[in-house]
Amino acid sequence: MKTIFPMLALASLVAAPAVAIQQPASRQAAPPHTNAGELTLYEMTNYNGDAMTIDAPRPTVHTDWNIRAISVHPGDSWQICARARFRDCITLNRSVNDASMIGIEGQIGSARPSPPPAAAPALTPSRANSN
């Protein structure tokens, strides 16, 4: 009887239906903590792999790997440029776990903090002409 029990237990495990645990197809990682005034470029999506942090305007940017994710400190805004010396830029004000979603498929040319928006000119009341 002792030899039959392990065989029955094994048979019940084999006969039991398999239960698949469903993982989300594109699990998005939360952006890592960044410091104010910093932009971090990542080698892999979801903020993984090698990283390069930029904390000042860089008229040229080069990594030894393709850029796959970008982390921006909340409240900051950066110009990410396709070409060196800040040409052909987009403004990024949030982190992106997959850089291909914003058109970056490899390297970028330059990066800098976005200039603050220009202040709107003060409106002065106009005087009505009295004739």
Image: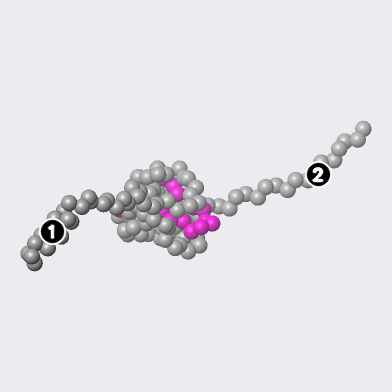
Residue marked by disc 2: 125
In the rendered image, which quarter is residue 130 located in? top right
Q: Position of residue 36 (x, y in %)?
A: 50, 62
Residue at image position (35%, 50%) is 24
Residue found farthest to the front: 1
Q: Position of residue 116 (x, y in %)?
A: 58, 53
Asked if residue 25 shows in the view, the reply is: yes
Mark 2 residue type: Pro
In screen coordinates, is 85 left or right of 8? right
In screen coordinates, is 10 left or right of 116? left
In the rendered image, residue 70 lying in the magenta stretch gets the answer yes
Neighbours of disc 1 within 10 Å: few (<14), some (14-19), many (20+): few
Asked if residue 56 shows in the view, the reply is: no
Q: Nearer the viewer, residue 36 or 17?
A: 17
Residue marked by disc 1: 8
Q: Nearer the viewer, residue 27 or 75?
A: 27
Mark 1 residue type: Leu
Does 124 sit above or below residue 8?
above
* Residue interval drawn in magenta: 65-82
Q: Secondary structure at mark 2?
A: loop
In the rendered image, residue 118 lying in the magenta stretch gets the answer no
